[in-house]
Amino acid sequence: MSVPQLRMESTKGQIGITTTQPVQEFEQQPADLEIQQPKADLSIETTPGTLTIAQSQAWADMDLKPISKRIEEFAQRGYSDWLDGLSRMAEQGDELMRIENGGQPIADQAKENGEDPMLEFNIGFVPSPFSVKTNYEPPKVNIDWQVNRPIIESRINKPIHGYKPGKVQIDMKQWPSLIIDVTGQEIDQKK
């Protein structure tokens, strides 16, 4: 008696996977920026300095006077000399009135009227010290300024984003199979 045999032959199934990678693109543009800086407003006002020099006293010390000053001095000197002469004549007249009191008033008066008085003079400087007067007023400077703020304008640019999705493709690379064969002889049965 022979036993039948089953013979099986199988082939495994195989899956094929094809993948396309996704692509992502990303670009960020910088912001658009405009900046303007106005100049500061500046104003400067100056008053010039002044120097005053008065040298009329120095000129007068050197006897270089204007004619109006000379006329004024001569008039004052003439008036003063007239008063001095009037006073001297009155005094001498009083002395002559009292001639009986003794003394020599006529000789004394002749000597006094005949001689010039002794002039006194010491060291002198021409022109006299500090005869030139100076006065100085320094200049004045007024500075005024105003700061202007910058003008800033900005625009944000949105990012540029591109995306291409990937793909996965699945297919059967090899289909599964099963082959079954029956082999062997038939069994005889004797009765």
Image: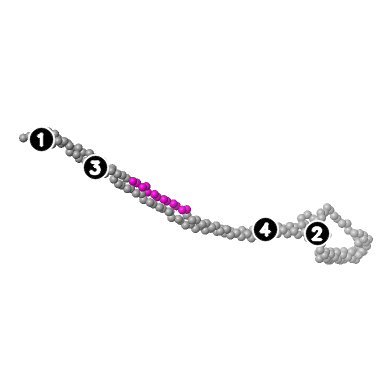
Q: Nearer the viewer, mark 2 or mark 4?
A: 4
Which is nearer the eye, 146 or 115? Answer: 146
Q: Which mark is residue 139?
A: 4
Between discs 4 and 3, the one toward the N terminus: 4
- The colour mode here is one colour
Q: Give the image quarter of residue 14.
A: top left
Q: Nearer the viewer, mark 1 or mark 3?
A: 1
Q: Nearer the viewer, mark 2 or mark 1?
A: 1
Query: On the image, numbered disc 2 is attached to which residue?
Result: 59
Residue 21 at x, y = what percent? Answer: 37, 47
Between discs 2 and 1, the one toward the N terminus: 2
Residue 153 at x, y = what percent? Answer: 49, 58
Q: Which amino acid does label 4 sit on?
A: Pro
Which stretch appears magenta?
Answer: 18-30
Magenta span contains residue 127:
no
Q: How crowded is mark 4: few (under 14 residues within 10 Å), some or many (20 or more)?
A: few
Query: On the image, numbered disc 3 is attached to which residue?
Result: 177
Query: On the image, numbered disc 1 is attached to which residue?
Result: 188
Q: Distance between the residues labelled 2 and 1?
A: 175 Å
State the residue at coordinates (30%, 47%): 170
Residue 1 visible in the displayed image: yes
State the residue at coordinates (69%, 58%): 49
